[in-house]
Image (cartoon, helix red, strand yellow):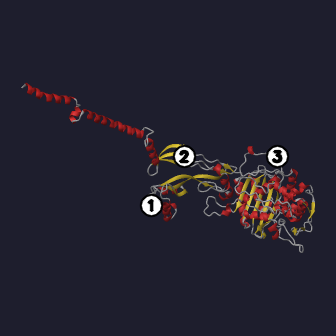
Amino acid sequence: MKREQTKSRRPSGSKSRSSRGRQPGARQLGLSAWRYRVVVVGLALLPLAALWKIASLQVLPDIDRGFEFLKGQGDDRMVRKEEIPGYRGVITDRRGEPLAVSTPVLSIWADPRVLDANADQLAPLARQLGIKLSVLTGRIAHYAGKEFMYLSRRITPRQAEAILELGIPGVYKNTEYKRYYPAGEVTAQLVGFTDIDDVGQEGMELAFNESLAGRSGFRQVLKDQKGRVIKDLRLLSSEKPGKNLALSIDLRLQYAAYRELKAAITHFRAASGSVVILDVHSGEVLAMVNQPSFNPNDRSRLNTQAMRNRAATDLIEPGSIMKPLTMVAALESGKFHPSTVIDTSPGHFRVGRKTFVDHKNYGPLDLTGILKKSSQVGTTKIAMALEPEAIRGVFERVGLGQGPGTGFPGESAGFLPNKQRWRPVERATMAFGYGLAVTPLQLAQAYGVLASGGTKTAVSLLKISPEDRQVPSELDRVIPSAIAVDVREMMKSVLEKGGTGTRAAIPGYEVAGKTGTSHKVGAAGYQQDHYVSLFAGMVPADSPRLVAVVVIDDPRSEDYYGGLVAAPVFSKVTAEALRFLNIPPDIPFPKSELVTAKEASFKEDLPKETSPKDVQTSRSGADKSMAKSDLAGVQKLVRAQGGAT
């Protein structure tokens, strides 16, 4: 019995020791203790692993494809850098009147990858854009796969909103600036214009494009899937507007000059024309106008011929308008004085194979009378008594053959011949303005030397502030003061009765000036029935404040002389300039002194020639062979610059 009881207890004791070695959970699961511990530890580590993964994705910076990677991926899809356009600087006249301003406009663009529009949506979109549906679909197909394409640029906010209201995905708007020119065609060639990207293309817009151009800024924004801005995140860089530019012109004078020039061009059926008004003291250009012109605000029918600033770029042969400078050379030589008398009888003078003829036999004339009558014979005799370099030297000293240095794009330096050996006929023709080429601006600068008492002042198209103005010194003197005063006094006679420039007179003011009428250069030499009419003068004559030059190219009416065509424009424009600038009258001007066109003589400007056998008046200053040989240089330059037409 005891043995059986003992045997029966052993299995029970053995089972009890095994059970005591297991965990309660392990007993329930039927697992060994070590397996149970592994399971528990594994389950405990799972949350830790999840936390580690979350931390690696959202907190730890150096983990590959961690939070920085995910943030970058999200930003690439939602965060955008938008441009803040910087507007272009304002161009004004000397009194602050705006000549070129930038106005905000909208441009419509699309992302071809996002653009999703059916035919029913594309048709109204094409209508709003003002293009054909086929053109629009072709453009979309061309830019397929790219991120950006313009649909329409620089339109009004109303037009832009009409397009956006179509609700087409992938179509967006962008703010830009468009240039507007308040003075329109009055200042078109001088101010110039910009292209669709607001970059200067012509005129002062081009010359000072770098300083006028604004610098764009950038901001970071958050956009939704439709490209709409949800939130401004931060400013990356601020935009910077361009610098303003103050020109030297006075818009009041500019309007007056443009009006009178346009009226003269229409009346005389001329091809083109220019007017330049210069401030004698500062060298500032107070007005510079040209015809024909164009409207820079509407270039849909732009004529490229109208874009040239002819006053600074086009070359002309000045003709008799150069005679006052020839008188300077004569007085500088010591061989002549204002009272020196030259016999112009019998009204013609032969030089080599050429014979130059006056309009009529004026007989003995002093130097003042030669200018007054614009005598070719008298001028030729003076030229033949001087060394050719004497006349050329004066021309060069006053700025001919050199660029005025205004910085205007395409500004011409003209043409001033320089020869080792001068033929006699070349000496004669240069003395009265043939064989060289100048611009109206150069003529104004040259006459400015006479007006300022012999000092040469740099010409400026920018406003010069009073503190920046330099007082001319003796180093700037290119003509003796006494000689400049004498020549100015001689030039007064041109506007007196019997002179060639009586129509340039201004009541209440003494004017000194000179007329000019030159033949135009053609393919076969000088053209017999095509002329350039000119007048250059200064006022008040004794103490000049203003110099003005008027050029009328190829007048097609019966009147073509400078005294009939250009002189009246000078009178009207300069009279208004004197009034605008509050320059008081210097003399009484009785009505009895006014001379009608019939009483005045205008025909002394054109050079005349005669044949040895038969002395007769001719309209040409040199025949075709001379034009081909002696003036080949100026002819080539005039054509290269587009001439004066």
Depth check: 17 or 308 in front?
A: 17
Q: Dot 3 corresponds to which residue?
A: 473
Q: Residue at x 89, y 57 (%)?
A: 330
First along the sequence among labels 1 and 2: 1
Q: Identity of the amino acid at label 2?
A: Phe
Between disc 2 and disc 3, the foreground one is 2
Q: Is residue 77 left or right of residue 191?
A: left
Q: Identity of the amino acid at label 3?
A: Ser
**Dot 1: what SS?**
helix
Q: Measure how far apart labels 3 and 1 are at the Cα level.
A: 74 Å
Q: Dot 1 corresponds to which residue?
A: 121
Q: Is residue 128 left or right of residue 395?
A: left
Residue 444 visible? The answer is yes
Q: Is residue 28 left or right of residue 231?
A: left
Residue 533 visible? The answer is no
**Dot 3: what SS?**
loop
First along the sequence among labels 3 and 1: 1
Q: Identity of the amino acid at label 1?
A: Gln
Q: Are marks 3 and 1 in contact (CB under 8 Å)?
A: no
Residue 611's quadrant in the figure?
Answer: bottom right
Q: Residue at x 66, y 61 (%)?
A: 294
Q: Dot 2 corresponds to which residue?
A: 218
Depth check: 528 or 23 in front?
A: 23
Q: Position of residue 99 (x, y in %)?
A: 65, 53
